[in-house]
């Protein structure tokens, strides 16, 4: 049986290991230029400043793109309560273990004491729960059309959103109403027989909370329960992001008395590119070549989605509809783990007609090749 002194020793030993893992790994707080006591608002502001400073479109120095990817990952961790808690306690190694176990936002994280002693020192590091029983206004999804080069290089920009917020003095416009059982719901009591009363729920827009209803024509809110508000939001498109992914802002949709505000989601929609087609991390390109190039080989210069030039050299005979893979010329993989591949399909442009002299010349060349092969 393990005595109290041994348990204390093991606990301290594991705490020292966690601290060492933090000192040896890259400090996410230093990457963003904030302290460990920084608020979520300060973290977001620092991230925006650092991401703009090291964005590849604006910073052409060597290593800027890698720094930008690290900053993006640091913000991804520190802006998520569960991941931030795990990082603060166990560093990047703890995050890796959390991800290997399929951990996402919320849920129990890795606890070394629970691993060693079966939970004797308490549970994991549970995150915030959305299922708290409170009613919320409808969440909003807005499609955000992005060019392929924005997915390739990443982008950061601001958008303006107009939402409805509660009137500043909305609480002054509520009155006690015991028939209200919740937002928009009223309880009606009907006597159906002597000694028998039936309760029926009916819709009542004036009910704003249990036991509270809205006073019509309230002078404290002359425009009604809500009023428009224009807010500015920062959208961060990380390198390698994909169509269908979302950037979410919690509690930013319309407000309503008796309800918590729902969420606002911007859904990425990829605008079709005139030259390239994307599938996952790979790009696909169709290129037409002449018959001479197909038979003799060629060098092809192409322009990538972000505008940089690259060259593809083909030395062998190219068949019609042959696909050539160009490693590392696809889309960036998320979190900076290299690039996908580019697949080029070559379509051979055969001439419509040949002169007799051209035909004879081709036959002569091919006949020489056949005779050489027989020898």
Image (spheres, rainbow, N blue to C red):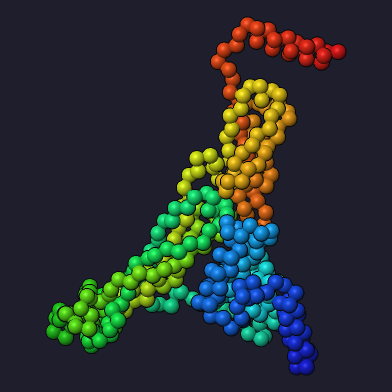
Q: Is residue 293 above or below residue 69?
A: above
In the image, residue 127 lies at what x, y percent?
A: 54, 77
Residue at 51 percent of width and 61 percent of height: 156
Q: Nearer the viewer, residue 270 or 300?
A: 300
Q: Is residue 312 above or below residue 338?
A: above
In the rendered picture of this protein, how many numbered marks are placed on residues? 0
Residue at 19 percent of width and 82 percent of height: 218
- For the C terminus, give its image quadrant: top right
Q: Nearer the viewer, residue 309 or 177?
A: 309
In the image, residue 252 lies at what x, y percent?
A: 40, 71
Residue at 50 percent of width and 43 percent of height: 273
In the image, residue 59 lies at what x, y percent?
A: 61, 60
| 351 left or right, relative to 197 | right
| 180 left or right, relative to 260 | left
| Residue 294 falls in image quadrant | top right
Residue at 62 percent of width and 24 percent of height: 290
Q: Which residue is at the far right?
A: 375
| Residue 5 falls in image quadrant | bottom right
| Residue 174 falls in image quadrant | bottom left
- For the N terminus, give its image quadrant: bottom right
């Amino acid at each position: 049986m393990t005595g109290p002194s041994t348990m204390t020793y093991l606990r301290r030993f594991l705490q020292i290991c966690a601290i060492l893992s933090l000192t040896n790994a890259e400090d996410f707080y230093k990457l963003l230029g904030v302290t460990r006591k920084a608020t979520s608002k300060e973290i977001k502001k620092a991230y925006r400043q650092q991401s703009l400073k090291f964005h590849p479109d604006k910073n052409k120095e060597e290593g800027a793109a890698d720094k930008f990817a690290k900053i993006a990952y640091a913000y991804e961790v520190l802006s998520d309560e569960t991941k931030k808690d795990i990082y603060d306690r166990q560093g990047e190694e703890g995050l890796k273990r959390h991800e290997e176990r399929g951990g996402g936002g919320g849920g129990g994280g890795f606890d070394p004491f629970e691993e060693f002693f079966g939970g004797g020192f308490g549970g994991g590091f549970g995150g915030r729960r959305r299922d708290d029983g409170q009613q919320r206004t409808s969440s909003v999804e807005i499609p955000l059309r992005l060019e392929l080069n924005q997915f390739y290089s990443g982008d950061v920009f601001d958008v303006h959103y107009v939402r409805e917020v509660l009137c500043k003095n909305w609480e002054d416009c509520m009155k006690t109403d015991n028939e209200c059982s919740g937002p928009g719901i009223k309880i009606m009591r009907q006597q159906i027989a002597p000694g028998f009363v039936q309760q029926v729920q009916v819709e009542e827009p004036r009910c704003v909370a249990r036991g509270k209803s809205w006073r019509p024509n309230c002078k404290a809110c002359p425009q009604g329960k809500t009023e428009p508000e224009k807010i500015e939001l920062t959208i961060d498109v990380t390198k390698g992001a994909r169509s269908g992914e979302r950037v979410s802002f919690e509690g930013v949709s319309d407000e309503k008395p008796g309800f918590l505000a729902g969420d606002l989601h911007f859904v990425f929609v990829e605008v079709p590119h005139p030259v390239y087609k994307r599938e996952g991390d790979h790009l696909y390109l169709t290129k037409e070549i002449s018959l001479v190039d197909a038979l003799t080989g060629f060098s092809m210069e192409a322009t990538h989605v972000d505008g940089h030039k690259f060259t593809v050299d083909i030395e062998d005979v190219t068949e019609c509809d042959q696909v050539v893979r160009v490693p590392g010329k696809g889309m960036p993989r998320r979190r900076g783990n290299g690039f996908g591949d580019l697949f080029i399909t070559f379509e051979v442009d055969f001439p419509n007609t040949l002169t007799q002299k051209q035909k004879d010349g081709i036959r002569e060349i091919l006949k020489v090749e056949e005779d050489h092969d027989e020898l």
